[in-house]
Amino acid sequence: MSDPDRRIWDGMLAHLRSQHPDVCRHWFDDLQPVGVADGSVYLRASSDIHRDYLKRQCLDAFIDAAQTTTNNLLAVRFLGPGDEPMIPTRAPGRDASIIEHKHPPAPRPRDAQSAAATSHRVHTEQPRVSDTILLNPDYVFENFIIGPGNRWAHAAAVAVAQNPGRSYNPLFVHGDVGLGKTHLLQAICLHIREHFPDLVMHYVSCEGFINAFMQAVQTNQMDGFRHRFRDVDVLVIDDIHFLNKRERSQEEFFHTFNTLHQQQKQIILSSDAPPEQIPHLEKRLVSRFRSGLVTEVEKPTFETRVAILFTKARLMGIKLHQGVAEHVAAKYDTNIRELEGAIKRLQIRAIVEGRPINLELAREVFDDDREAGPQPTIDEIIKIVCRFYDVKRIDLLGKRRHKSISLPRQIGMTLTRMHTGLSLEEIGAQFGGRDHTTVMHAVKTIKQKRKQDPAFNTIFEKLESTLLKNTHET
């Protein structure tokens, strides 16, 4: 890659970290810039998992970074280790950074015995991991913090990942929301994909299973549905408790479970409650869920929460001091999602105000004089802004661009960005279906206006104080 293209990539990284901190991950530094050609920036990820995650979770942010850095309408294309860009060769003497035409690599031959061994299970070309839930490359075992409340669940998950179909089948992990069940399930999938690449996995939410079943019934395609869920080596279903009150879905899953279990295929389930406490779940399913290992994930201790905060910060590329981590851990003791949300709030506040993440900032964000409570909701923010500026909700969320509406709207977006864990895309969707770049512009505009206009800054701080006070009182 040429120096100009390297500068483009460096500029993109800087833009991502300043404007899209919520999507940034520490492994972005490992992305390999391949080149710029035919209106696209090509980046190579270290694995297909990373490539797929970037495509589904980060594409808009990368496009914004590419276009802002170059001031050109560039697209961004992500490649896996074995992917080659299909780009026409440029004539000699053209820009050296242009990628030359590459043909996809020829498939590697397999011996006849290996092909025969798998032909009965893989009838068509299909991915080894079929997932309607996106696998997060951060959710590996190495990033899972072990504590007294999750030690046994972690050990069981590792055992299953290392020996699928033979240890703890089924594995049933339960616990309250936000305690790491999904992390364990995804860590199992990522480990199996790396160490047992020939195994076919299907990872789906319970809702995804139910929706697929209903669609198959309505379209008379049950054979395809059963092939999808039964012709696998590993079936992973998140939030299986949503199977309650679904008699036909329970019936179908009962037979799916039996088929897989009889063939010693691995089944992994997660739930908010143990099998016997899931309401309206058939006794025969309760019995089968309990036939393997049922293990619980409990609330993390203070020491575990501190370690989790350091890990989350590292994955987000944030340097966190011990005092800050301990301050946040003391405030939030319910679940890991709260801890992650707290880190994001600190990060956003630091970026918006141009300040370092230190104990002083943490004390401001998580006021020592009050107990940590729920974050303000976007509805509360909208109500306070509408009341203060005497505008109607329908106008604030509508398409009008008059200054009397646009300024309150930008304030609402900025407060939402600062005090909730919502992404730019989610905020834009809430504010009348706007694009994430509109939210970015709003935050940048308000930040600049606060610096240049002391009177406006006083108004903004008053609104923010009212919001936090009302949230605490409710």
Image (spheres, grey):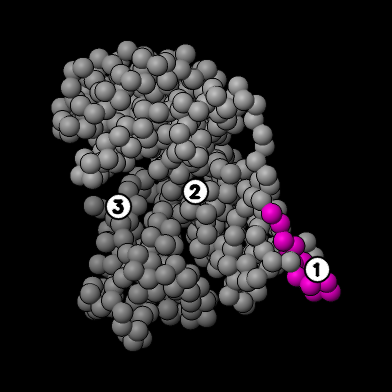
Q: Residues within 10 Å of mark 2 (few under 14, many from 20)?
A: many
Instruction: Determine whether the residue tagged by mark 2 lies in a helix, strand or loop.
Output: helix
Instruction: Quickly name the residue at label 3.
Output: 472
Instruction: Determine whether the residue tagged by mark 3 lies in a helix, strand or loop.
Output: helix
Asked whether, in this view, residue 216 is left or right of residue 33, the answer is left
How far apart marks 3 and 1 lie (CA) works out to 59 Å
First reached walking from the N terminus: tag 3 or tag 1: 1
First reached walking from the N terminus: tag 1 or tag 2: 1
How far apart marks 1 and 2 lie (CA) works out to 42 Å
In this view, the mark in front (3 or 1) = 1
For image coordinates 80% across by 68% down, the residue present is 96
Instruction: Quickly name the residue at label 1.
Output: 96
Asked whether, in this view, residue 353 is left or right of residue 334, the answer is right
How far apart marks 2 and 3 lie (CA) works out to 19 Å
In this view, the mark in front (2 or 3) = 2
- Secondary structure mostly seen in the magenta stretch: loop
Q: Quadrant of the N terminus?
A: bottom right
The magenta stretch spans which residues? Answer: 90-103
What is the three-letter code of the residue carrying label 3?
A: His
Instruction: Quickly name the residue at label 2.
Output: 343
| Foreground of the two, 264 or 391 | 264
What is the three-letter code of the residue carrying label 1?
A: Ala
What is the three-letter code of the residue carrying label 2?
A: Ile
Asked whether, in this view, residue 220 is left or right of residue 59, the answer is left
